[in-house]
Amino acid sequence: MKLRIIFVGQPNVGKSCLLNALVGPEVIVSNYPGTTVEVTTAKKMVAGEEIEFLDSPGIYSISDRSEEEKVTEKALFEEEIDGAIIIADSVSLERSLYLAFQVLEAEIPVVIALNFVESAEKKGIIIAHKKLSKILGAPVIPINPLTKRGMEELVNALLEIKETKGKTFTVRYDDHIEDAIREVSSQVTRTQLPKRFVALRVLEEDADFYGYLSDKRTIKAVKEGLIEHPKVAEDIAITRYGTAAFIAGKVTHLVHVEEAARSLDERLDGALLHSLGGPILTILTFVTIFGALLFIGSWIQDILTGFTEYLLSLIHLGVGFGGTALEAGLAGMMAGISIALPYVFIFYILFTLIEDAGLLSRFVVNLERFLRWFNLPGRAIIPLALGLGCTVPATRSTRILFTKKEKFFTASLLSCVPCSSRIAIIMGVVGYFGSKWLALSVFITLFVSFLVWGCIMKRITRIEKKPVLYELPELPPYRIPSIGNIVTKSWIRMKTFVYLVVPLLFLGGVAYAGFDALGLTNVIVAPLSPITWWLDLPNVAIIPLVFGFMQKDLTGSMLLLVLGGKVSSVLTPLQIYTFGVAATIGIPCIIALGMFIKEFGFNKAVLLTAASILYGLLFTGLAWRLISLF
Amino acid sequence: MTEESDILRIVEEDILRILGEEKSKRVSLESIKSEIKVAYLFISNAIKELEREGLVQSQGDFIVLTKEGLGKAENIVKRHLVLENYFKIKRTRSEREAHKITDILEHYISKEVIEHIKKLSTFKTEGIPLTKLELNKEGIITDILFPGYGLFERIVSMGIVPSEKIKVVYKIPDGMVIYVGGKKFALGNEIAKGIEVLG
């Protein structure tokens, strides 16, 4: 037998942490509300039965309003699931119960995992979980994923989850609404979903459910009949929340606890949310991360490069084409690893650190006003910041945004956000063969191109201006991040890089050797010479740019290959700058293109990639011409 | 799925409310029966329980509030008013209908809220927009006014509902950070304007 169980809970309630405790460390745990954007699955064998867990993004309600909610809703209704674990926050039980009631309305069996019991007790909130279980007709189990409290009971309850079906609590609405529910229910056809649930969703104005009615005119007729409830949807929500608060109140016992004086949390928020200090601290933090990346990164890069050269000197693969190709492949791979890996890893460690400490959500609030220039919501900062690591996962994380336009716009901005591989080009090529100041001017040029691209896309996408902070970001309490959690999480984020990018580095090297042996390099160089003319670069410089699209980390090593290692004597400083800018603006590589296709469809992805590369080349040509005037 | 003890509690509160609404603080058993449509057994049990707690006294066919009961009844009436006001005035419902919904909902409010209303010296029925609430002063949400259901439901599911306590803890450019139900949220003034509170 196999059980499929979905995790449902508010953002930041410890869903992924619980999944971690139940299954193992292969799940991302965040202190930024809304980092899980797709449903992650994990399996566990218990007493000869396989339990498959589906993690879902944190939500407050399962209604169809944002992508996060859609993901959870889809998982709830379209995947075949046997039940749900509702992770409830003991500190705000009524919010969790609101969500639980919605799941129960869909007649999905639930087990309530009561989290943060200890911290609630510290605040003087004691929850009678047995009483709650009796009221809900479903198991309620106090848990603590860190100490593994309640894990065994939870698994045992899951094995019997189907037993609760039909015996659970349902929210009762007032008589008129109940009559309306009955009337709409009688029209529900063509679905496996419970009729009462569909009726409720219809009354709650969820257009996705209108199709299940045999006669859509019923909706209008029923609503017009409800003179007592001109806003029936709102009354349903209020009653549901009221019931949640009522039951939470019934099972909660409050003990008076002396409140600590102005706590550290308050003082931190006072500084981080200050109207002037907040943005300054935010930008300073990012600058610090950047600085750390450059210094620690180049230090590790030196060590790894030395080690790689030593390794390669030991290997002699013999003569002939096979040997050369293999050697070129290895060289490409090792160069890529030593240039990019340190940056990627350090970046993710630092990013995860600020995320888990609870700082990231404050940064989102502080940077919101800048993103509003582009009519983007504050949370767009998450994918953009992740873009400094790798464009591929950053593109995927645009799913936390609300509309398709916002997602596409934000993802398109990633063409001007240098990922670690592009940072490595700027530092390793421009900085190393040119100068630190030259590298800095490339970063500045990128920033300008970011703003220009943003303004163009703002015109194209025409996203409506929305109220300030309309997504109401939650500001979670600050936490001291656990080292184990950070390392695990950084590793999971890097996994794509290691498994996908490293083999491609090898293949890229081999491909170049093949091209070279067959004398095909000219086939690329000649027809593309107008581009190199426009950029005022030697014709062969197109090779690293083209191969760079296969895999960005090849750019540096390819440039060395085609120029015979003498970058600074062949290219002028201005040309080094031009090469740096040309190699960094645009959708960076074929892997990123693949992710774009997955997220936005083939046509849009290819169009965007082509446009971004064209924009990059145009911008670079104009930039060096402008600079050469001075 | 209401338990008997719940019904008893609801009836007890209803009796106190009816008594509190009456100027003389004295109501006949008959009018209680006609207003609370539950089995008589519940009413008589509830009265017995209230008498035991020293909140009411039976005087023949009439029920009278004691001094202690008066304080409690007034709190229940105030709480009732917040919700009735929400459903009647704000939603332009008929008064009778508002009464009915309020009857269901008022029992859902936590004791903390009653305590809070108790502290208010004068009871105002009209709220002010959240943007006008003083910093760090606790208010009570009286209404949520948004054009579409989407934002409304989202806000309600976050625990921002009428009768909840709310506090503005920081002002940020064009917005604020609020503390409600043990959690902090950031929101813009435009949205805050749609949340009405009693300061």
Image: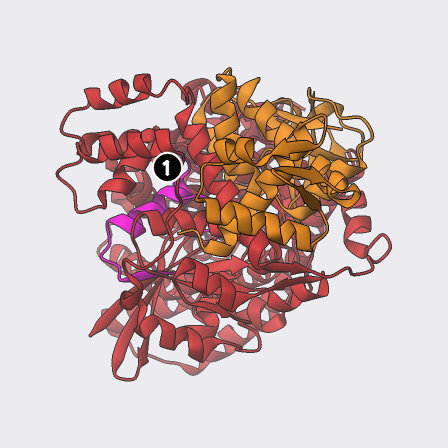
Chain colours: A red, B orange
Decide: few, some or many residues near mark 1? Use Cα within 10 Å; few <14, some 14-19, many ≥20: some
Q: Quadrant of the C terminus of chain A?
A: top right
Question: Residue flagged by tag 1: what amino acid is it?
Answer: Asp
Left or right of residue A192: residue A205: right
Q: What residue is drawn where x is 25% and y is 18%? A: A221
Is disc 1 placed on a helix, strand or loop?
loop
State the residue position of label 1.
A64
Q: Is residue A335 left or right of residue A256?
A: left
Residue A310 lies, in percent from the top left, at 51, 78
Of all chains, the one bearing label 1 is A
Q: Does residue A491 appear anywhere in the picture?
A: no
User: Residue A424: x, y in percent?
Assistant: 54, 54
Q: Is residue B149 visible?
A: yes
Front-lying residue, B41 or A409: B41
> Looking at the image, is A29 positioned above or below residue A555?
below
- The quarter in which the N terminus of chain A is drawn is bottom left
Most foreground residue, A378 or B47? B47
User: In the rendered image, which quarter is residue A605 located in?
Assistant: top left
Q: Residue furthest right?
A: A261
Query: What residue is rendered at 50% in x and 36% in y?
Result: B33
Residue A204 percent across, percent down from the top left: 36, 31
Q: Is residue B136 left or right of residue A617?
A: right
Was residue A15 drawn as part of the magenta stretch in this picture?
Answer: no
**Residue at 52% across / 78% down in the picture?**
A148
- Give the magenta range: A58-85
Residue A60 lies within the magenta run: yes
Q: State the image coordinates of residue A329 (x, y, percent, origin top left).
A: 34, 66
